[in-house]
Image (tube, rainbow, N blue to C red):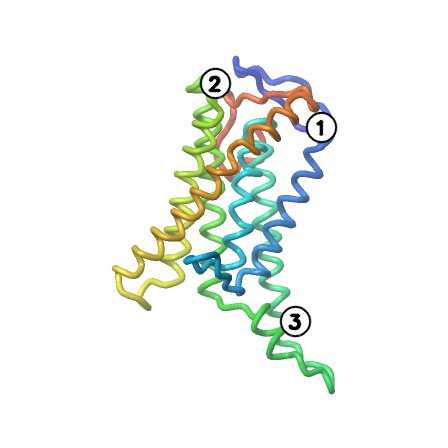
Amino acid sequence: MKTPETNSAGTVRPIREFRYLETLTIAFVVILLVSNLVGPKICRLGPLLVSGAQLLFPITYIWSDVFTEVYGYAASRRAIWLGFLGMALLAVMGQVAVLLPPAPGWQDQAAFARVFGLVPRFAAASLAAYWAGEFTNSYTLARMKIWTGGRHLWSRTVTSTVTGQLVDTTVVILIAFWGTVSPHHLLVMIGSSYGFKVVYEVVATPLTYLVVGWLKRAEGVDAWDAGTNFNPFAFHR
């Protein structure tokens, strides 16, 4: 993929080809889609009960940090929109497949519908939360890179996770469960899910350091977003 780079002075450099960006973007979208498919499974981890999606989805925030830190906000914005479109297509086509009559003798319709069946409220909650949370995460990291002069990567990854996951978790739970449980239970659900996701990504910070450092050396790039248009609907810098 060819992407313009912006240095710390906000100067746009010539378009160039990156070796790993396309592969990382594909992996990002695949992780999103798989996390939606494994979401219905509830897993026990010691005293915690978490969905399959909670084990995988936080990785997308690590990916978003890598996109923004190495390639810049524009690359992250593109990946976020591709992921959003992939999730929407999965939800729609899954529902179409569920509604089509099963072939005679096929006995797995109920199980198939349980996994792929579209519950509009939960689908809307998932898409809205993903979109808002990912853009909050990427915007926070890009802005903080300028404020910190590119120092203290850990402060940017942690702060962007804290803000992005707060938006994501709050939006998804409020849309999905508002009016079905008490306000107290809503707060408990938000707090427990949010805490798990933040701890998950803080623990992964050393890995983020390794990946970011390696990619910067391999690609020969360290994008700065001083002159970037941060409008999520703008597909240019």
Q: Is residue 131 above or below residue 219?
A: below
Under circle 2, the secondary element is: loop
Residue at the spot x=61%, y=24% of the render? 213
Q: Is residue 51 above or below residue 7?
A: below
- Residues 15 and 73: in front is 73
Farthest-out residue, top: 9
Q: Is residue 14 left or right of residue 176?
A: right
For residue 97, the mark is 3
Nearer the viewer's eye, disc 3 or disc 2?
2
Q: CA distance from mark 1 to mark 3?
A: 37 Å
Q: Amino acid at mark 2?
A: Arg
Q: Of the residues under marks 1 and 2, which one precedes in the sequence? A: 1
Q: Is residue 67 left or right of residue 229?
A: right
The percent position of residue 205, horizontal first and vertical second, equals 51, 33
The quarter of the picture where residue 6 lies is top right
The percent position of residue 13, horizontal first and vertical second, equals 64, 17
Q: Quadrant of the N terminus?
A: top right
Residue at the spot x=52%, y=25% of the render? 228
Q: Amino acid at mark 3?
A: Ala
Residue at the spot x=43%, y=42% of the render? 199
Return the residue at label 2. Answer: 151
For residue 18, the mark is 1
The percent position of residue 162, horizontal first and vertical second, equals 40, 38
- Residues 179 and 162: in front is 162
Farthest-out residue, front: 46
Q: Is residue 222 above or below residue 171?
A: above
Residues at marks 1 and 3 touching, judged by CB atoms closer than 8 Å = no
Under circle 1, the secondary element is: loop
